Image (spheres, grey):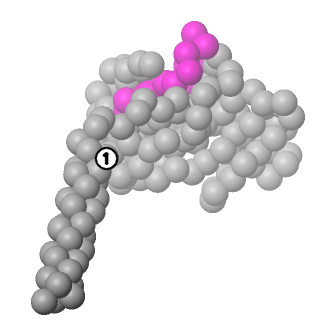
Amino acid sequence: MEAVRANSHRPTFLKASGLLQAGLFLFAGFLALSVPEEARADFRVCNGTQNLVGVAIGYRAKEGWITEGWWQVPATTCATLIEGELQSRYYYLYAEDAARGGRWTGDVNMCVAENEFKITGVQDCFARGFQRMGFKEYDTGRQGSWMVQLSDTPGTQESQN
């Protein structure tokens, strides 16, 4: 009878142990979902319009001036253009509304290409087979992260860190 008793207790212990492990696993998953995401340092663009927007960014790097694009940012969403801590004080942005052709531009000329691109240098865009567009300058004040909000109303594009 002693052997039967030991065997009958063992499965109950294993069941309880399995339930405890499952409960702890679920609790850990709940904690992971309920804890706010850690703040990240990035350069982000948020599209506050009702249309798809194509975005290009320019910045100074070790190898010189760089322009990159195109990020396709759907209506009312955000995209991260640069991941991680920002290394420069100034960043430059150019964007086009894919449906209506509207543009967010500035006075700083940089090179862009028709399709996805990463271009080193901002001189002689046409001679090198690129287009030249006016980018808007954003002074991040050396903040680690920055966000630009694109909107339908000209002049209301807000930047914040």
Q: Position of residue 118 (x, y in %)?
A: 72, 48
Residue ranking furthest to the front: 1
- In the rendered structure, the answer to whether residue 142 lies left or right of residue 50 reads right
Residue at (85% x, 48% y) in the render: 128
Residue 15: tell me if it is visible: no
Q: From where the camera sits, is residue 136 visible?
A: yes
Q: Residue at x 62, y 26 (%)?
A: 86
The residue most toward the top is 141
Of 115 and 15, the residue lying toward us: 15
Residue stretch rendered in magenta on the structure = 134-150
Q: Residues within 10 Å of mark 1 (few under 14, many from 20)?
A: few
Residue plotted at (26% across, 44% down): 31
The amino acid pointed to by label 1 is Ala
Q: Residue at x 55, y 16 (%)?
A: 143
Percent position (x, y) of residue 8? 15, 83
Please tell me whether residue 112 is drawn above or below residue 116 in the rendered image.
above
Which residue carries the number 1 mark? Answer: 32
